[in-house]
Structures are given as C-alpha cells and as structure tokens.
Image (tube, rainbow, N blue to C red):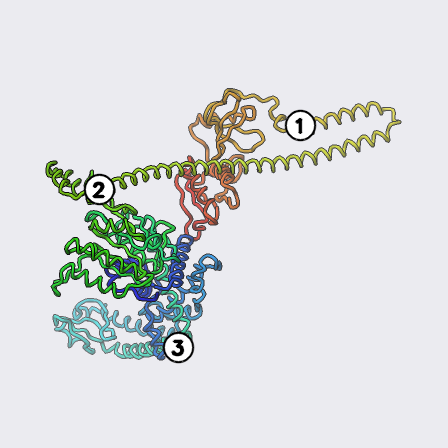
Amino acid sequence: MGQDIPKKTLDVLEYPKIIEMLADFAQSQPGAKLCRALLPETEPEKVRSLLRETTAAKDLVRLKGSPSFASVKDIGPHLRRLSMGAPLSMGELLDIAHLLRGADALLRYRGDNDSLAPALSGYFEALTPNKHLEQRILSAILSEEQMSDHASPALYDLRRRIGRAEQRVKDVLSGLLRSPSYKKYLQDGLVTVKNGRYVVPVKSEFRSEVAGLVHETSASGATVFIEPMGVVEANNEIRVLKGKEQAEMERILAELSLEAGRFIEAIETDYRTMSALDAIFARARLSENLSAEPPIISEKGALHLKNARHPLLARGSAVPISISVGDDYDALIITGPNTGGKTVSLKTAGLLALMAQSGLHIPAEYGSELPVYGAVFADIGDEQSIEQSLSTFSAHMRNIVDVLGKVGPEQLVLFDELGAGTDPVEGAALAVAIIEHVRASGASLIATTHYPELKIYALETPGVENASCEFDVQSLRPTYRLLTGVPGRSNALAIASRLGMPESVINDARLRLSSESVKFERLIENIEKNRAAMEFESKKAGEYKREAAELRRKAQELYDSLERSKEKELERARTEAMRIVEGAKEESRRILSELEKLRREVDREDFRERLEKARADVSRAISGMEDAADPVRRTRDGYTLPRPLRVGDTVKIEGLSSQAVVTGLPDANGYVTVKAGIVNTKVHVGELRLVEKDVSAQAKGYVSRAGAPGGATAKSELDIRGMTSDEAGFAIDAFLDANVLAGLSTVTIIHGKGTGALRAAVRGHLRGHPQVRAFRPGTFGEGEDGVTVVELK
C-alpha cells in the first residue's frame, strides 16, 4: 500500500472530470482549490475517515440544509502581510471580518448537539470566532472603498468640517452661476470638481472675464474649467482637511491591522478549517447530485458493485451494471460486441474505485463494496502515437510492459481489448500469458476481449470468470447489461441473417466453422437461455416477495392501530370506571348516613313514613349507579334512527366524542362501515346516532365563516408533537374544520423534526384533503421542517 495512483490512470479513467464536477459544488475559491487538489488515498483508515466526513456532511445537509461558505475568501496574502506588520486595505480587513462572521455562523449551524455529525466535530471545534474584532472592523468599514464616519471621533470631526467647507464653496459658486452678469460667460450652470477643487465651466472666449485659476480645458477646447478667486481659500482649506482625513483613515487601518495581527493564528485556523469544510460539503452535494451512496471498504480485497452507473453519463441513458472481482475469482474476462458497453463497464469499475479512495460516495446501490487499492493501472482506448510511429498494438504493448513491471498485491489492473491488433492466435496466447502474470503478482484484473480462446480459458481456469455484455439479436442493439458468469456469443451469423444475408451464404459459413466452435457457441446459447429463464423466475419471485412484504407491512400497521385503539379504549374505560366507583362510594356513604340517622329516630311517630321515603331514595340511587355503569345501554334507550342510513351520512358513535362518515351500508349482522378521520372501521348500527345537517344553511347555499362553532375561538396553530399518526389525523381534521368555519386562510401544524415519521404522516394526510388548498414546510423563522404551513380553501 502507499503507492501513488499513476497520472495516466487518472486521465484514462476521467478522474479529473469528476474532480472538476466536485469543484463546481464548492462555494468558495479556497474550497474549490482543495477539491481540485483531491487525489485517491491508498491507506484504508484515511479512506474510511474521508468517507465518514462525506456521509456526516450529507446527513447535516439533509437535516439542516447546506451551510454557507461564501464568506471564505483567499486571505493567504492578507495573513502574510499581517505577519510582516504591514497594514491591510479596507477590502482586506473586510475579508477577515466576513470570515470571522462565517465561522460564527457555522458554529450556530452545528448547534450544541455533537452527536449529529461526530466525524466533523474536530472541524467545528477548531473554529474560533472573534466577535469583538469582527464588530470593530464592520463598524469602521462600510465597503472596500468607504470608511464609516464613526470609525473614530477625529474622522467624524474632520468630515464634518470638510462638509461645512464644501458647502461654503458651493454656496459661493451657486451665487455666481445665478448671477445675470456671469451667465453669458458659462458653458452650463453646473459646478464640477477638477483635481480635487471646485470649478465652473467657462466658455473659452470669455476666460479673461472670469478671474480665477484655470485647472483644465475640455478636449474640444470650447470650455475651460476655472476656480474663481473667491473660493480658492476655501478649496485650499478643503484640500488640507482631506489630507488630514486620509491620514486619519490610514491610522485607523493600521490600528485595525495591528489588532487583527494579534489573532493571526486563530484567523488562519478558521480560514483553513472553513476551506476544508467547504470541500467536504462539496463532496456531500456531489453525492446528492449523483444519488450516490457510501461504499463499504472491504477488508478482503473484494470489489462488488451493485447497479453501478458511470457518473459522467446521463442518468437516464446509463444502464446500471453489477460487477465483482477479487473474492471467488481474481480475474474477470468481459466479452461482447463493439459498442456493447465493455469499455464503459471497465471504466465504471476503475473510476468508482478512485472515487471511493478519494472519500467520494459512488453512484451505486447501498451495500456496494470496494477495497483500498495500493495502485490502479489502466490500458484503455486507442493510444496510437503518430509522432513515434507506433501502431495501436505497439502502443498498447508498451503500456502493458510498463504495468507488468510495477504490478503487485492489492492492486487493480484494467486492460481493454487485451492482445488486439495482431495475429489472433498469437494475440490470444499473449493475452493469456499477461493475465497469468498479473494473477501471479497478487493483483485483481478486469479485461475485455474479442478472442474466443479467452472465453474457453476463463471457463477452464479456476479463479478466472467470464462476463459478457448482453446483445439483443432481434433489435440488433446492445442492452448494455453486464452478465457475470456467461461468456459472450459472437452473434455474427445471427446478425448477418437478420440483416438479410442470403440463407445459402449463412449455411455455407456454418459448414466452414469447426465442430468445436459450433459446440462452443451452442453451449453458450444454452447457458444464455437457462440464464434468461432463471432471471425471469427470479424477477417473479422478487415481485411476490415485495407483495408479501407490503401485505405484511399493512397488516402490521392495522394491528398496531387496533392495539393503540384498544389501549385508548381501555384507558378511557378505566378512567370512567374509577369515576363510577367514586360516585358509588359517595352515594353509599350518603345512604349509610341516612340509615344511621333513621336508626337513631326509630321512636319517632313518623318513622315508618321516613323509612319508606329512604327506601325510595336508595332504590333511585342504585338505579342511577346501574345506569352509570352501563352508559351505552343508557344512551341507547329510547333512540332509534329517524331513517335508514345512507352512504355519506354523518353519524356520531356512542361513547366517543368524534364524528364519522358512513362509507358502507349495514351488513347482515347490522355492522356499518364508517370513516373517522383517516381510520376505517365497522360499528354496529345500534351504536350510531344520525347527525342531521343544518338544512337552513344548506338552503342558503353557503356555510357561514363568521366564527367557530359554539362561539369558540379558532386557533391558527396546532401542536401534535407526541401524538400517534391516528391521533394526529383526528386532531388535524377537527382543527381544519374549526378554522375553515372561522374564516382563517392559513394555519400551522407543529409536528417537530424527530425521525420524520410524524411529519410524513401529517403531509400524507393533508395531500388531497378537501379543506386544503396547498401546504409547505415552514421557512426560517417559522420553524423550518418542524412545522407544516397549510393554506385553507
């Protein structure tokens, strides 16, 4: 390990294009510079660390949005000048102030929860904002060319005096411009400034008529700019004051630079840390753009890419491939027709290996595995050198010779069209020998070829596997799918036949093929048919498995919902039972007290009459306790539905405060299907009361929005944090109904961020809701993704 990846490999596999894509996602020039300097690492622990950083940044972006690094400017030259004691300009000091402000913003972005992104904690902890220095600079300097009047008391006084002197000059010149005797001498009625002094434009022919100093002549010579003698002294005063102003500004810049110099180490640390963080978050944004995933770093030297895409190909046109090497076999031989995707497969494997070793996520399915290669060697494409008069074969051989001299264990070698460009027999023999040499060195190898001899070699040699790029003979088009374990067919005769070649010519060609070639092609054809059949059955099994998993999920959700409903009903029953028991105890105490009183009054004349009255009271009390113990029976007594139920009727379920809508008529056992909020259930018809609609309001053709029902005041916010999805659904329906009646147009539902499950349930419930026009996440200051803002119809 530790060997550098050759530059030729980086170029051939188009690694610089990926790095340029990465740099485009950086927000600052220093961050982009670090991106462009990124090279693949060859130490496994360093690679894992880089990948953890990228993953942590991506998690933060998804949770909190992307932080800003726009304040990071290239302040390296500023810091060098500070270290030498030289004062900085206003723009340079502003760069430092903005950097300090950005460091403070990054710490607030991270917040107090270190567990959110532990891989980045060291970067955030290295930041040291300096609010005092930041505020001193920003309060003194307004822009790169403007210093604040309040940068110092002396500067404020000087500018006040300059203002008064300039006003005096303007007053004198304005009077001169308005003077009838001078008007005929002037080119126009404007006061201007030349060489820092106020002047008036005078026609050239009248220059002797206006006493003063000539400062400039127009290009045409028609106008001279004269400083009248009456304002020379005032202009002199302004010039002196402005010289003092400049000196004071330089003093302030020197003072601010001196103070910044005292914190040069902390400022430099902030600069380097923020530049590094910008590069890390650029890796995260590239991952999001490519829909990439972090690879698993293999300890065994195995490469397993699942549904990998070449990152430089358009996502819609790139056919995902799955490719493996280095586990059960250390060499993979890919065959197939030209333009069938062999070279793209080769480049995809190599480029994704380089990306992973650079800490970049790869555009492949989660669970893809890559080792950390000590080196990657690639000989891909036509590198014919006209200047050196080298043939294609010679150019490839020179590259391969160079690779064979360097290759070793824990490395990856990629050969495109190995042995091509020479006699087929010699080329195939040479290709096998090269493959064996690479295998003997301990490296993994992926090679593409047209030679049938290499297909047979891969079939017969342990540790070597065939793969092919699929070709559809019917459409005469490659599918670009990589099939591991299946050697590619030549398809030449089949393609010629499909293109209209006479059958006699096709049959003649078949007769000229050797019997071994025919048997081999038939063997491949049978393998291909069996593979297609197995793939079809596997696809069907996968669909059945997904359907079963979905049914299981829905059944579990229903079970969980019923369990929650059961628990709520039991809790409600326990509370009601406690209330009934307490009432019964109280009533019993009262009855016993009455009986005790009667016992003491047994000798009174009206005892029998009082005894009968007490008996009646006890009987009524017992009846009342029985009614309380069976509220359903008590509420049902005497009520019958005024008419048969219809689909769409609003009903009230006895024992519950919520209302429901009838969605199915009573079955043979009298059970009605109703929908309460987002829950569908069945309730016996005897437990339902019909809620009649307000006919008078319907007759008027509108529903009043003057206020909430019963005079209640509608609230524009609903906090459902801690609720289950079902509870939230009931609460949201009631909340929206109340606010529609109250006439509110926008309301807010507070669900918190958490795991996102409650937020997803809320937005799923709002989607298609009859009361909802639109909804969106909250913005900054509204609660961001912890709330959902709803527009009502």
* Tag shown at residue 258: 3
Q: Which circle's residue, 2 or 3, is located before the other in the chain?
A: 3
Quadrant of image for the N terminus: bottom left
Residue of label 2 = 519
Foreground label between 2 and 3: 2
Q: Is residue 238 visible?
A: yes
Kind of residue indicated by mark 1: Asp
Measured as percent of width and height from the top left, residue 611 is found at: 81, 25
Residue of label 1 = 627
Residue 744 vs residue 410, the one in the foreground: 410
The quadrant where residue 245 appears: bottom left
The quadrant where residue 186 appears: bottom left
Q: Which circle's residue, 1 or 2, is located before the other in the chain?
A: 2
Q: Secondary structure at mark 1?
A: helix
Measured as percent of width and height from the top left, residue 668 is found at: 51, 20
The quadrant where residue 657 appears: top right
Q: Secondary structure at mark 2?
A: helix
Separation (CA) of disc 2 from disc 3 = 87 Å
Q: Which circle's residue, 1 or 3, is located before the other in the chain?
A: 3
Q: How many tags in the picture?
A: 3
Q: Residue furthest right?
A: 603
Measured as percent of width and height from the top left, residue 340 is found at: 22, 47
